[in-house]
């Protein structure tokens, strides 16, 4: 290597040529960042899995009648616990299987959560029974209070239920409480 080529390398060492399109892209990105409002850090909630109720019913039937082939599935268990009060998703026979399944529920946290949820539903119905028609005020109060999105959605769903469906949910909540307190 000649002396002049070494000098050129040293001179150009810190400088790299950046294409115009790369520079334009960087500028556009910076402008977009300035226009965006600052992001708030959120904890990512797992996407709700839309499960076919027949899958959950089959899971419960297999648990009851064929334990050698049955395999625990956390997602299915969670789905059952979340939807066991909905008579459209779990019919009466499936609900009775679900209550038997809940008797063997492992884990103190899960049991505590199910008990708290059933208690909340039973108390909500008792309060509704005393003064029907005031649940709309509860929705407005919940939206202004610091509650979770799930609680607000549950209260809105509750408000849209018929009196008959509210009574069904109450009966199911009482049954869950009865089974878990044994």
Image: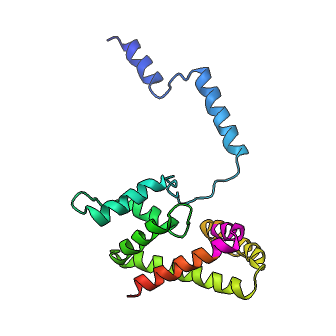
x, y percentage for residue 140? 76, 73
> 56 or 107, which is in the foreground?
56
Q: Residue at x 66, y 33 (%)?
A: 27
x, y percentage for residue 80? 45, 64
Per the image, is 106 magenta? no
- 50 relative position to 61: left or right: right
> 92 or 60, which is in the foreground?
92
4 is higher (above) or lower (below) than 172: above
58 is higher (above) or lower (below) than 102: above
Write the start and end of the magenta stretch as one range. 154-166
The quarter holding residue 135 reads bottom right
> 100 or 137, which is in the foreground?
100
Per the image, is 160 magenta? yes
- 118 relative position to 69: left or right: right
Q: Main secondary structure of the magenta part?
A: helix
The quarter holding residue 34 reads top right
Q: Residue at x 73, y 44 (%)?
A: 35
135 is higher (above) or lower (below) than 16: below
Q: Residue at x 61, y 32 (%)?
A: 26
x, y percentage for residue 119? 54, 83
- 127 relative position to 99: left or right: right
The quarter holding residue 122 reads bottom right
x, y percentage for residue 120? 57, 81
> 165 or 109, which is in the foreground?
165
Q: Residue at x 50, y 64 (%)?
A: 91
Q: Residue furthest front?
A: 93
Of the 4 image quadrants, the one containing the C terminus is: bottom left
145 is higher (above) or lower (below) than 32: below
């Amino acid at each position: 290597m000649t002396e002049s080529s070494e000098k050129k390398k040293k001179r150009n060492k810190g400088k790299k040529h950046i294409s115009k399109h790369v520079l334009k892209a960087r500028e556009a990105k910076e402008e977009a960042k300035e226009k965006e409002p600052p992001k708030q850090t959120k904890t990512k909630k797992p996407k709700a899995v839309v499960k076919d109720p027949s899958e959950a019913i089959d899971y419960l039937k297999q648990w009851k009648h064929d334990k050698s082939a049955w395999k625990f599935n956390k997602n299915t268990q969670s789905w059952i616990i979340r939807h066991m009060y909905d008579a459209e998703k779990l019919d009466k026979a499936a609900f009775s299987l679900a209550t038997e399944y809940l008797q063997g529920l492992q884990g103190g946290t899960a049991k505590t959560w199910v008990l708290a949820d059933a208690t909340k539903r039973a108390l909500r119905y008792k309060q509704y029974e005393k003064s029907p028609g005031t649940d709309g005020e509860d929705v407005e109060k919940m939206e202004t209070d610091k509650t979770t999105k799930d609680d607000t959605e549950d209260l809105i769903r509750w408000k849209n239920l018929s009196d008959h469906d509210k009574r069904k949910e109450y009966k199911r909540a009482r049954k869950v409480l009865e089974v878990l307190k044994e």
